[in-house]
Amino acid sequence: MTARPAHRHLEPLMPLMYRLAGAASLTAYATAITAANYLTARHGMVHVGFGLTTTAGTFAAGATLLARDAVQDTLGRRWAVAGIAIGAALTAVTSPALAFASAAAFLLAEAADMGVYTPLRAHGWARAALASGVIGALVDTLLFLYLAGFPVTTATVGGQLLGKTAWATLLPVLLVITVRRWRRALPRHTVRA
């Protein structure tokens, strides 16, 4: 007699749980886009050390890269684009000047991100999230700084990439990997029929 997996009783709820996770991811995505633009409009450029500067919203913008991957995994690519539209619309309320730069940069960055994430996803989430996060961050940084009228210098590009890749992409991916390994190391209890 083979043991049934412990989570078998949850299978009927999986579609609902996936939709809820998708809605949460989409909300986090649109909120992070809006927060990044609000912080940038309110505080402009900030120093991050090592002679680097970045827009104040960089750390929130970096979170969008992972949130976008979660939206694609749970709801699909079209909802990722819808998240950009929602974020741009909310940004237009708080900062119309940044709305165009943000929407254009996010759309191009997300297209680049999807182009990297989608084919790599089959080889593991962490690899796909890290590679697509770096590419998305580079495209978003260069285009946003230029369109929003910020200086495109070594100090600003370096500061943006430090915030988006190290703090907002690498750190969360490492956290997810650590939690997954910890969970796998826990003893499993099977339910006997």
Image: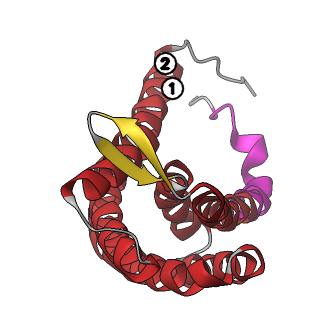
> Does residue 142 lie above or below 192 as drawn?
below
Residue 129 horizontal/vertical position (percent): 37, 53
Work out whether residue 79 or residue 162 is closer to the camera in this orientation and state it.
Answer: 162
Which of the 4 image quadrants contains residue 22?
bottom right
The crowding category of the residue bearing disc 1, from other C-alpha atoms within 10 Å (few below 14, some 14 to 19, many at least 20), is few
**Residue situated in front as seen by the camera: 152 or 80:** 152
Residue in view at x 77 percent, y 45 percent:
10
- Crowding near the residue tagged with mark 2, few <14, some 14–19, many ≥20 C-alpha atoms within 10 Å: few
- Say which mark, if any, is on residue 182: 2
Tell me which segment is drawn in magenta: 4-21
What kind of element bears circle 2?
Answer: helix
Q: Is residue 99 left or right of residue 126?
A: right
Left or right of residue 68: residue 116: left
Q: Residue at x 53, y 52 (%)?
A: 56
The secondary structure that dominates the magenta segment is: helix
* Residues at circles 2 and 1 in contact by the CB criterion of under 8 Å: yes
Whether residue 123 can be seen here: no
Say which amino acid is labelled 2.
Trp
Residue 4: percent from left, percent from top:
64, 34
Please give left or right for residue 100 compared with residue 156 in the image.
right
Amino acid tagged 1: Val
- Report which residue position mark 1 lands on: 179
**Of all residues shown, which one is farthest toward the top?**
187
Residue in the picture at 75% in, 28% down: 193
Q: Position of residue 140 (x, y in %)?
A: 37, 70
